[in-house]
Image (cartoon, rainbow, N blue to C red):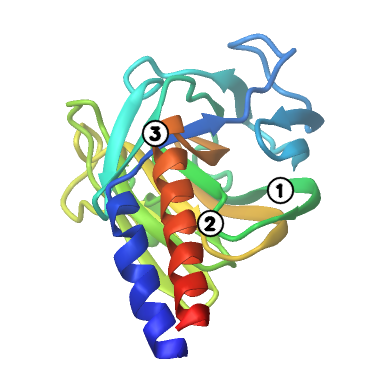
Amino acid sequence: MLACLGLSLAVVVSPASAASYNVDWMQMTPTAFGSPPPFSGTYNLPGIGTVLMTYSPIVNFTEARFQNVNIATGSLPYGGDTYSWTNNEMLARTNFNTPPNPINTAWQVTYTFSGTVPAGKLILGVSGLGRRNPTPGSNETVADCTSTASVSQNGTYFGDWTNGQNWGATSFSGGAGNFSMQNSQIGNGGNDPWWNTGLALVRIDDPVSSLTVNFTHTSGDGLGVNIGTIVPEPGTLALLGAGLLGLLFWVWRKSKS
């Protein structure tokens, strides 16, 4: 019975496999674009509710609520589905430290929710992960010249949205309970496409009450981060509803046979 039920579910809901979803990004109002969000601030995330965003001040760092016109609106396919948005913005930070100050600085941003967010509901967007050339005459390693982002959760990488810009692709590494991202370019840096990544989208595959993104941030690099919710478009909801009704009808017929 369970095997038949699983087969029936796959058959019934298959029309919804090519679905359309909206990504609703967190908006950091009332902070104005170009102004720094508070280091501890509460915002509304559509479909989830109140979110507390916290991050730490760092010497010689600047931060702002920022919107890049090249990625503010976009659409990314994954697994036959399409994920679209019109409102991307980000917490943007730039590291202005130069030798002999720390040139690769660790920091983190944490999003704390009022309840538990179901698995697959939350999406993370990270952009602008940079690379640069080693400082002449220094003992800098490749790691010193590369910005990275890492999360201690399971995640599915959907890909990058670049909107035709000359940016390097994100290199995504995932394991059990963690994932990380950095610029995929390995040659000399300093110019596009070496300097920045596009907007990388990662679905969070665990239920979470908070999400922390850890950065190592190289000197001279500016990067951005935000979270959003995945919302089925009305047509997708109708297909999902039709699939559920079909499954219930199949179960009812089997119970009568």
Give the residue at x 34% y 78%. 7
Secondary structure under tag 2 reads: loop
Give left or right: position of 34 versus 243: right
Which part of the image, by quadrant, shows the C terminus?
bottom left
Amino acid type shown at disc 1: Thr
Residue beneath disc 1: 110
Between the C-alphas of marks 2 and 3, the distance is 19 Å
Q: Residue at x 44, y 33 (%)?
A: 233
Residue flagged by tag 2: what amino acid is it? Gly
70 on left or right of 206:
left
Query: Which residue has dot 3 on it?
Result: 235
What's the CA distance linking mark 2 and mark 1?
18 Å
Query: Is residue 193 visible from the viewing direction of this image?
Result: yes
Residue 129 location, x and y as percent? 39, 43
In the image, is 231 to the left or to the right of 74? right
> For the residue labelled by badge 1, is the local secondary structure a helix, a strand or a loop?
strand
Q: CA distance from mark 1 to mark 3?
A: 34 Å
User: What amino acid does circle 3 point to?
Assistant: Gly
Name the residue nearer the viewer: 17 or 252.
252
Res 4 quadrant in image: bottom left
Q: Residue at x 30, y 31 (%)?
A: 75
Contact flag, marks 1 and 3 (Cβ < 8 Å): no
Q: Quadrant of the N terminus?
A: bottom left
Tag 2 residue: 120
Image position, residue 121 (x, y; %): 57, 50
Estimate the x, y position of residue 105 in percent, counting from the top left.
Answer: 57, 49
Closer to the chain start, of discs 2 and 1, is 1
Labels 1, 3: front one: 3
Question: In this view of the protein, which residue sits in the foreground, 228 or 59?
Answer: 228
